[in-house]
Image: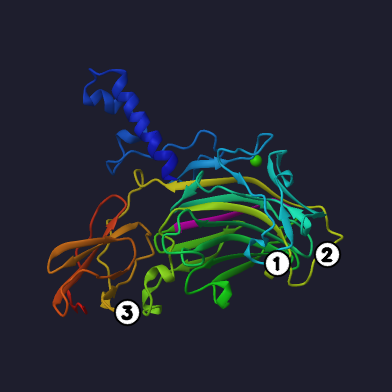
Amino acid sequence: MKKYTIPFLLLSLTLLACQDPSSSSSELVSSLPPSSQDNPNGILPLEPEETCLEPRLDTYWVCTWSDEFNGDQLNRDYWNVEVNGNGGGNNEAQYYLEENVAVEEGNLVITAKKETYINKQYTSGRINSRYKVSAKYGRVVFRAQMPAGRGTWAAVWMLPLFNRYGQWPNSGEIDILEYVGYDENRVFAATHTAKFNHTTNNNPSFGKTVEQAEEAMVTYEMIWSPGEIRVAADGDFYGTFRYIPQFNQDVTYDEVFPFDQEFYFIINLAIGGSWGGVEGIDNTIFPTQMKVDYLRLYEYDYAVDTFDPPVTPTNLATSQLENTIHWNRDFIGTKVEYYLIYVDGEFHRFTENNQFTFNNLVANQTYEVQVSAMDFLGRESAVTQPISFTFEG
Ligand SMILES: [Ca+2]
């Protein structure tokens, strides 16, 4: 959640600098938060968002945004409420109305009803945080209770803020939680991309049985790192999505894993549709509700963690794709922010992904190519042994 933390940090520093122009640099340092004075990595620690009711998780995760849904109305600084009957692109049976979205008794409550509205026989609710709250990497944690009944289809999911790689599905979709009422107590997580999506019936997906998903509040999570997305339900990390370039040598990384951009949240309760309606809609279940206690975003605090510098990337090789190289990502630490590409011993480009396509070298010329890794503290590994690479014009 750079949007919230960076302005805050800049503002804090500006205020410190303005309060006393005669302050020496040592006085400035002493007025910073205590943990920054002895932090091992020379960068400022993250500050938790004041309104977040669980400011830190597992030592190194800091809550930088949250909606606790504890007021008496939806916070419009965070959310847009959708009003439409377009079926969500899945032939869904509901019309989304504002009146079906409420904040009450500490929860976001979305109610689906059996009522005719314009061309639909059901109404329900859907909110999104586009242009208001978005994230790239980090840990998303929320607590939710699923609706009951055949025909419901609840989801907490993310779409790209900007379609950097083109229209859906090319820029990606992250379904942190999906729940269809006919498949009781089974929760699912999925990703959709240009090469792997539900229209081609090959999107990666994980499912888990969660007893009492409909009766109780359950905690769901996603940890999103460069090249990797992990999902959890009830404390169990049951699914991992990873980009492995060797398995997809015929396409650029963004067709498989375009998750290196800002994404925003969507929370909705659909009725029917291509998945929720597979076994029809039970008209006796209405009204039915989906509830969310809170939604929180955590960032990893690299300032206070001590970890080894990145290791030299392995298995650097040319890909089947023209003018393209790839190498292995070390997933264990998930602390590599960038890779550096070197051509004939000179720095050429940064890339966040472990695949790179050259596009501006001299045709038919052969180069020596090397790669190194850089972590979130700006520490660089040694470079790989060079490989020989000929640029096809
Ligand atoms: Ca709450």
Residue labelled 1 has its Cβ within 8 Å of some atom of ligand 1: no
- Residue 201 appearing in the image: yes
Residue 34: quadrant of the picture: top left
Q: CA distance from mark 2 to mark 1?
A: 13 Å
Stretch in magenta = 216-224
| Residue at x 28%, y 75% (from the top left corner) | 324
Residue 75: quadrant of the picture: top right
- Residue 212 appearing in the image: no
Amino acid identity at mark 2 = Asp
The crowding category of the residue bearing disc 2, from other C-alpha atoms within 10 Å (few below 14, some 14 to 19, many at least 20), is some
Q: Which residue is mark 3?
A: 321
| Residue at x 77%, y 55% (from the top left corner) | 118
Q: Position of residue 11 (x, y in %)?
A: 37, 30
The crowding category of the residue bearing disc 3, from other C-alpha atoms within 10 Å (few below 14, some 14 to 19, many at least 20), is few
Main SS of the magenta part reads strand
223 in magenta: yes
Residue 3 against residue 159 in the figure, above or below: above
Q: Which residue is mark 1?
A: 273
Amino acid identity at mark 3 = Leu
Label 1's element? helix
Q: Position of residue 266 (x, y in %)?
A: 59, 53
